Amino acid sequence: MTLHPTIARVTDRIITRSRATRAPYLERMAEARARGPARAHLSCSGQAHAYAASGADKDRLATTTAGNLGIVTAYNDMLSAHQPFERYPGLIRDALRGIGGTAQVAGGVPAMCDGVTQGEAGMELSLFSRDVIALAASVALSHATFDAAVFLGVCDKIVPGLVIAAQAFGHLPAVFLPAGPMESGLSNDAKARVRQQFATGDVGRDALMKAEMAAYHGPGTCTFYGTANTNQMLMEFMGLHLPGASFVTPNTALRDALTCEGARRALSLSALGQSYTPVCDILDERAFVNGIVGLNATGGSTNLLIHLIAMARAGGIVLDWQDFSDLSGVTPLMARIYPNGLADVNHFHAAGGLGYMIGELLAAGLLHPDTKTVAGGGLGLYTQEPRLISDTLTWTEGAAQSLNDKILRPVSDPFQASGGLVRLAGSLGTAVMKVSAVAPEHRVIEAPVRVFADQDDVKAAFKAGTLTGDLVVVVRFQGPRANGMPELHSLTPLLSILQGRGQKVALVTDGRMSGASGKVPAAIHVCPEAVDGGAIARLRDGDILRVDAVQGTLEVVTPGIAERPAATADLSAHQTGLGRELFATFRQTVGAADSGASIFGG
């Protein structure tokens, strides 16, 4: 199938825009590649230090060249998504011993949960944790004793941070090994209903706790289609997972087989063999375009509008929100997964999942078919699905048609003709909106604003019953420089209640919403942010704002606000406590949301 002209045009635009930064990056990777495996360059003393605790693998590390795999892990046993990684190092070591290789845990990275910290002070460290993870993973690999790497991570900031580090060590091959989603529990829709009932006082905390525990009940990622599961989709579309690896549940024979094969595959791609495939060759401009198409086709998390930009820039590739919007315009929305529908990721996977979707998009010319991947040449391999046949891991042809058209549809009959993301621009600045769950009748609103500088003030106004009539709730001073850009997802139930009462309502903020952003239109990531004097800092209660996701505009209707002085806010309460004081340098140096909200420049 011929590549769709918009896919080709946007890709060419990215390549042209990135030349000045991509070429020096590839030169650095070529220099690192030319030096060969670094382990042999260490002194005898250095090698002895590196191998001293390796037990049965010590002699093999010192005397053979079968390859040594570095494991970078986000394991902790507090978070369901990362608890399964406890077993992975042992599985990986055993798998590699069988082919004469070795593996060492190079280091760990922090992994925090946005669900636990939602609406809490700790959320103000969430976005910054991505760059901390990149730094920590780089420290882990800096010992330069590895021929390849595997990265164990799943959730919101963890995978993007690990990808940034993998790009810094882009001369090494790497495979990302997921843990998989937990088994389905209480449906996400039922959980959401209980949350709304609690918000209105119709049920007590005991009912809320019972529902939450029934929804989040075992090892693995949350089953809704938020940032964590969007990350897993991206790793498959971009060729860093083995085909079909994303949504296999933890602690199963198939999950273990994929983990072992992923480790063997990573080592087979090292410079010691004949199939050398470093990360820098996989993550090119085409791979990022494929990832953005996947993001739109699945109605994925708005957080990736920040993370993908930061991930790409780590490899010298410059993306902007217009790329996302243009690709969204030609990408059909093929999936309905909560919060865009009632199904969870397990139901999506059973209906045909990513393999079916990739096959459809390839046939329509909406993906680059010739990208390099950890599975080998070409994205066509990712239409296959893994099976255990007589205890042997085998890939077979995936679903040729959707097994449930209420969850997954073909390109020829999508849920909507365009993808789930829209760029908004106008006199208020630039923002983005996830529209895949927003009904068409709610995608345009022109109404007076109510301005808040704290999400708790919004909750207080809701409880006081003062959020009446049609309105646009503006929550400002929530950008990366102000307080780390926390998610404001805890506002979703309240705003949904207002919408359910027949009010027209929207949210506008320089902060973030969750990857589970839902039915209320939310213009988020507004740039410039309020602390930088952006137009959002000049709004006052009663100003008329037009939020138009159809035309892609974000306009202040009230005249004269540009001449007003910018409001200020007392942010001192957000500067200390729970480690926030340690991140002052991050707040001072972080870039804008539309450049990736990163401390690494750009």
Image (cartoon, rainbow, N blue to C red):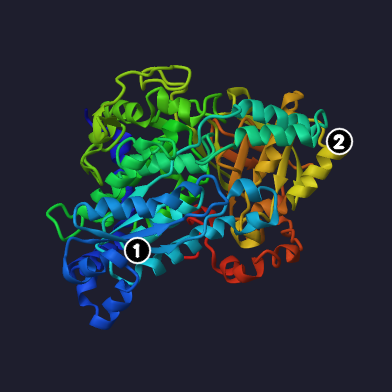
Name the residue at 35% across, 42% down: 256
Using the rendered image of the protein, determine whether residue 12 is visible from the camera's viewpoint: no
Number of callouts in the render? 2
Q: Which mark is residue 372?
A: none
Q: Check disc 1 and give the amino acid type.
A: Ala
Q: Which residue is at the front of the view, 30 or 435?
A: 30
Up/down of 126 relative to 287, above or below: below
Q: Secondary structure at mark 1?
A: helix
Indicate the position of residue 228 as horizontal and vertical percent values. 49, 43
Looking at the figure, which quarter contains the N terminus?
A: top left
Q: Amino acid at mark 2?
A: Gly
Which mark identifies residue 168? 1
Name the element at disc 2. loop
Tell me: 32 left or right of 466.
Answer: left
Q: Nearer the viewer, mark 2 or mark 1?
A: 1
Which of 178/125 is in front? Answer: 178
* Location of residue 302 with respect to 102 vertically, above or below: above
Question: How far apart, in angstroms, are the residues tagged by discs 2 and 1?
Answer: 51 Å
Quadrant of the rendered image containing residue 513: top right
Residue 378 makes an appearance in the image: yes
Question: x, y percentage for residue 504?
Answer: 72, 29
Quadrant occupied by the C terminus: bottom left
Q: How far across and how far down the image is residue 246, in percent?
A: 39, 38
**Residue denoted by label 2:** 465
Choose the circle earlier in sequence order: 2 or 1. Answer: 1
- Front-most of 32 and 141? 141
Classed neighbour count for the residue bearing mark 2: other residues with Cα under 10 Å, few (<14), some (14–19), many (≥20)? few
Identify which residue is drawn at 58% across, 48% down: 525
